[in-house]
Amino acid sequence: MVEVKRKLLDKYSLNANGIKVDVEIITRDDKYVPQYIISLTNISDTTKIVLEKIREEFISKLDLEEIERSRQEDIDSMKKKFTVSLSKLISKYFPESNEDTKNTLIDYLLEENLGLGKIELLLKDANLEEIVINNHVDPVWVYHKKFGWLETNIKMVTEARIRHYSTMIARDVNKEITVLNPLLDAHLMTGDRVNATLYPISTKGNTITIRKFAEDPWTITKFIEANTISAAAAAIIWLGIQYELSILIAGGTGSGKTSMLNVISNFFPPNQRIISIEDTRELELAKNLHWVPMETRMANPEGKGGVTMLDLLVNSLRMRPDRILVGEIRRKQEAEVLMEAMHTGHSVYATIHANTADETITRLTNPPIDIPKAMLSSLGLILVQNRNRRTGKRRTFQIAEVTKAGDPNVMIQLNAIDDIHEQVNDSQVVFKLISLYTGITNDQIIYDLKQKEQILNWLVKKKIYDINDIGRIMANYYTGKLKLV
């Protein structure tokens, strides 16, 4: 028998509600992708066997259909009731266990039966961006910030278990997933985005895709340190935001568009009202900002109560906003309202699916969005994000301004070979526009950019990563109180 060679890439521990979890990321000769291996360190294999016996005895008394129909308040009530029952069973099978051990085992069993089981353990790993269940035959996959897609050692027991999880998630946000309505877009109570599909729409089995909400959001310091963007390129974005230019962030799926939208919000001044509009809440701004987050809502099964992106966009213009952040532009009406907002003096920041600055203009000026090219001159900058599918690295690919004719002038371009950002063209529009409205000269603008670059490099040097710390530094900058030490 040939021995399988393993290589350890990384190892760390998690604490999931008192359950200690060891994570190992390894490569194996017999596998084509790295493996994400989790093991429960404070629960032995023998204990797991006994727990499974308890689980079977416990589950035989449960009405799963009743659980699926229940609301969150009912589940919380059930948990309290079941804790008493489980406590008796654990005392029966583990008479020597202390209170801490008993509570850990109860939490484990509750998550297995009323929660998302071992998926709850994955949700505790801040290194993961995506958790994917494809069916009950294949292992669960995860997308790791450092290592990309990994195959885990977790499998779902049955297709019914996957469907049960989907139903529970839908119920918590007053939605449903059924044979007649087999697609679900929802979010967990933690803010993590969830998409689910049922067989036979997904032909290999039921699926769940969870995009994790960033508890520790990306900041400009982290982006510069990770080489996602250079300090010089970030200074141009900061300049545009300071002088209230509207910015559109383009890129493919998973390229970091929403993360960049969160990052550029680091540059907002504290004395302006900011309205954000998203389908599912992902943005996290500094606490010192005057920020009102808003979220769309799907219609109920009777088709009532829906609140669309367009509804919120139109409403936001009545809320005296200085800045409007929009999760994603998909339709013509949304784009028209945004362009109208730009023309009436609002600064708008939004994302769109496109891979280059040229493609962004093409996307905006052709169906289904189909905005007249002449309207695009109100857009200040286009910022293009890119993810290298081979390496998983995310980078700012281009920074472009929009000319009066509605064409892009690329100022910053990623040199993919050397992995550096290079200035490829001088500004034709932005500098002149800033000069026109402020009276400052071209030389003063260049000096301002150098000063901003210095501050950004200082943030990296001092390792200031927290979004609220950066928010206070930006507030000091805008009020003239910032001193670099």
Image (tube, rainbow, N blue to C red):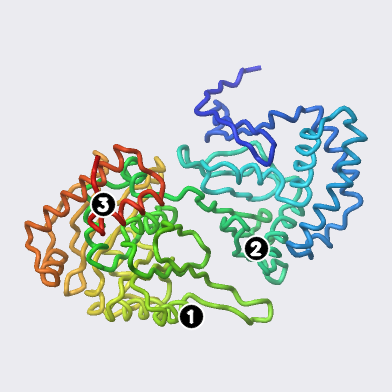
**Mark 2 to mark 3 CA distance (whole Å):** 43 Å
Q: Residue at x 23, y 46 (%)?
A: 483
User: Type of residue at label 2?
Assistant: Ile
Residue hosting label 2: 201
Q: Are marks 1 and 2 in contact (CB under 8 Å)?
A: no
Residue 96 to residue 240: above or below: above
- Which quarter of the picture shows residue 430? bottom left
| Rendered location of residue 339, percent (x, y) | 31, 77
Q: Quadrant of the N terminus?
A: top right
Residue 310 to residue 207: above or below: below
Q: Residue at x 17, y 74 (%)?
A: 405
Residue hosting label 1: 311
Judge from the rendering whether residue 18 lies leftward or rightward of residue 439; answer left or right. Answer: right
User: Which structural element holds mark 2?
Assistant: loop
| Rendered location of residue 123, percent (x, y) | 60, 46
Furthest residue to the front? 481
| Rendered location of residue 165, percent (x, y) | 71, 55
Toward the viewer: 183 or 49? 49
| Rendered location of residue 40, percent (x, y) | 69, 32
Toward the viewer: 82 or 408? 82
For residue 234, the mark is 3
Q: Are marks 2 and 3 in contact (CB under 8 Å)?
A: no
For marks 2 and 3, the one nearer the N-term is 2
For marks 1 and 3, the one nearer the N-term is 3
Q: Residue at x 48, y 48 (%)?
A: 216
User: Type of residue at label 3?
Assistant: Ala
For label 2, the crowd category at 10 Å Cα-Cα, with few meaning under 14, some 14 to 19 and many 20 or more, is few
The mark closer to the camera, 1 or 2, is 1
